[in-house]
Structure formats: structure tokens, C-alpha cells
Image (cartoon, rainbow, N blue to C red):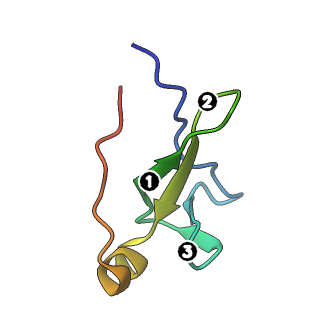
Amino acid sequence: METGIQPPAGTSDGQGWCHWHDGPSGTARLVDAHERQSGPPVALYACAPCREQRGLPVRLEAS
């Protein structure tokens, strides 16, 4: 089943993006997805330090 949640957009060096510190990260994982009126959910990713600092649990990504 397609969820519409996409992996984090890669940066020029192939790393993911952390939406909490607004920067590239090699440890970014899905932590939340916001529903929209139309279109797929907006996925939010956080790096390991941001997840630990803010107590953000990692969500399982649909394959």
C-alpha cells in the first residue's frame, strides 16, 4: 500500500535533512507526518541529536 510519505530529500552530499535544526544530517529518520487537505502527507525528519534532545520517537517508514 502506498502511503505517499517520501524519504527525506537528499542534499548534494547524499545526506538526509533534519527539519528541527534545518540542516543536513546523516542520521535523519522519520518522526512525524502531517496530513494535508489534498496530496500526500508531509513527512518530517529529525537527526539523532534532535530526536534525543526533544524526545522524538522514530516512526516506522512504510516500504
Amino acid beneath label 2: Pro
Q: In which quarter of the image is the C terminus?
A: top left
Who comes first in sequence, dot 1 or dot 3? 3
Please state if 11 lies on the left or on the right of 54 as rendered. Answer: right
Cα gap from disc 1 to disc 3, whole angstroms: 11 Å
For residue 52, what is the image quadrant?
A: bottom left
Which residue is found at the position 56% from the left and 59% from the top? 15
Q: In which quarter of the image is the N terminus?
A: top left
Q: Position of residue 36 (x, y in %)?
A: 64, 38
Badge 3, how many Cα within 10 Å: few under 14, some, many 20+?
few
For residue 48, what is the image quadrant?
A: bottom left
Q: Position of residue 43 (x, y in %)?
A: 54, 47
Please state if 31 lies on the left or on the right of 16 as rendered. Answer: left
Residue with the mark numbered 2:
40
- Residue 10 vertical position relative to residue 63 in the rendered view, above or below: below
Badge 2, how many Cα within 10 Å: few under 14, some, many 20+?
some
- Residue 26 vertical position relative to residue 37 in the rendered view, above or below: below
Residue with the mark numbered 3:
20
Residue with the mark numbered 1:
32
Amino acid beneath label 1: Asp
Amino acid beneath label 3: Trp
Secondary structure beneath dot 3 equals loop
Cα gap from disc 1 to disc 2, whole angstroms: 13 Å
Please state if 3 lies on the left or on the right of 49 as rendered. Answer: right
Secondary structure beneath dot 1 equals strand
Secondary structure beneath dot 2 equals loop
Q: From the image, state whether disc 2 or disc 3 is nearer to you.
A: 2
- Residue 56 vertical position relative to residue 14 in the rendered view, above or below: below
